[in-house]
Image (spheres, rainbow, N blue to C red):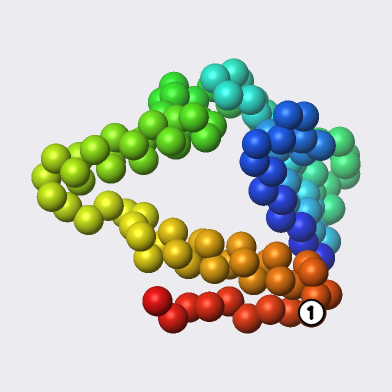
């Protein structure tokens, strides 16, 4: 199996697939294409069918706008953080989660510059 995962954040014009999801295999393939607040479609092609043209299944736009984009994610995190501040609770993700994310970034930077695998610090 060969796979590829891309997470492209903060890019002005990311390469395709920008708003797509695909699963490709030896028995068939599925690809979903969508845009925030607009209808989308799923295309399915199976290996053992007479007609290899895609079956297209349209779907309605998502009505819950809080699920879209990093702007809405930031708003949800900020609301959660404010609620934690108001109630004296520990936010999630918290400080330890942030430290682990930063440690992974540092290890990636070290790996890029050394050309070798780098160990991620998990001792906090």
Residue 44, horizontal then vertical, whole percent: 74, 41
Residue 111, horizontal then vertical, whole percent: 74, 72
Residue at figure coordinates x 78%, y 67% from the top left: 112
Residue 55 appears anywhere in the view = no
Residue at figure coordinates x 60%, y 20% from the top left: 39
30 up-or-down from 124: above or below: above
Residue sitting at the far top: 38
Which quadrant holds the N terminus? bottom right
Work out whether residue 3 or residue 15 is closer to the camera in this orientation and state it. 15
In the displayed structure image, the side of residue 94 where residue 15 appears, left or right: right
Residue at figure coordinates x 54%, y 32% from the top left: 69
Mark 1 lies on a secondary structure that is: loop
In the displayed structure image, the side of residue 80 where residue 52 appears, left or right: right
Residue at figure coordinates x 29%, y 35% from the top left: 79
Residue sitting at the far left: 87
Which quadrant holds the C terminus? bottom left
Residue 49, horizontal then vertical, whole percent: 83, 47
In the displayed structure image, the side of residue 109 where residue 49 appears, left or right: right
Residue 16 appears anywhere in the view = yes
Work out whether residue 123 or residue 13 is closer to the camera in this orientation and state it. 123
In the displayed structure image, the side of residue 108 where residue 120 appears, left or right: left
Q: Quadrant of residue 116?
A: bottom right
Q: Quadrant of residue 43?
A: top right
Residue density around tag 1, few if under 14, some if 14–19, many if 20 or more, within 10 Å: few
Q: Quadrant of residue 26?
A: bottom right
Which residue is the site of mark 1?
116
């Amino acid at each position: 199996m060969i796979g590829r995962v891309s997470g492209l954040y903060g890019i002005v014009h990311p390469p395709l697939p920008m708003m797509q999801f695909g699963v490709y295999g030896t028995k068939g393939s599925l690809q979903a294409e969508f845009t925030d607040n607009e209808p989308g479609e799923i295309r399915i092609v199976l290996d053992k069918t007479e007609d290899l043209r895609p079956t297209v299944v349209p779907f309605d736009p998502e009505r819950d706008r809080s699920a879209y984009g990093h702007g809405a994610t930031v708003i949800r995190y900020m609301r959660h953080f404010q609620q934690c501040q108001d109630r004296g609770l520990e936010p999630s993700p918290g400080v330890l989660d942030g430290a682990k994310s930063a440690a992974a970034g540092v290890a990636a930077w070290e790996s890029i510059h050394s050309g070798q695998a780098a160990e991620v610090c998990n001792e906090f």
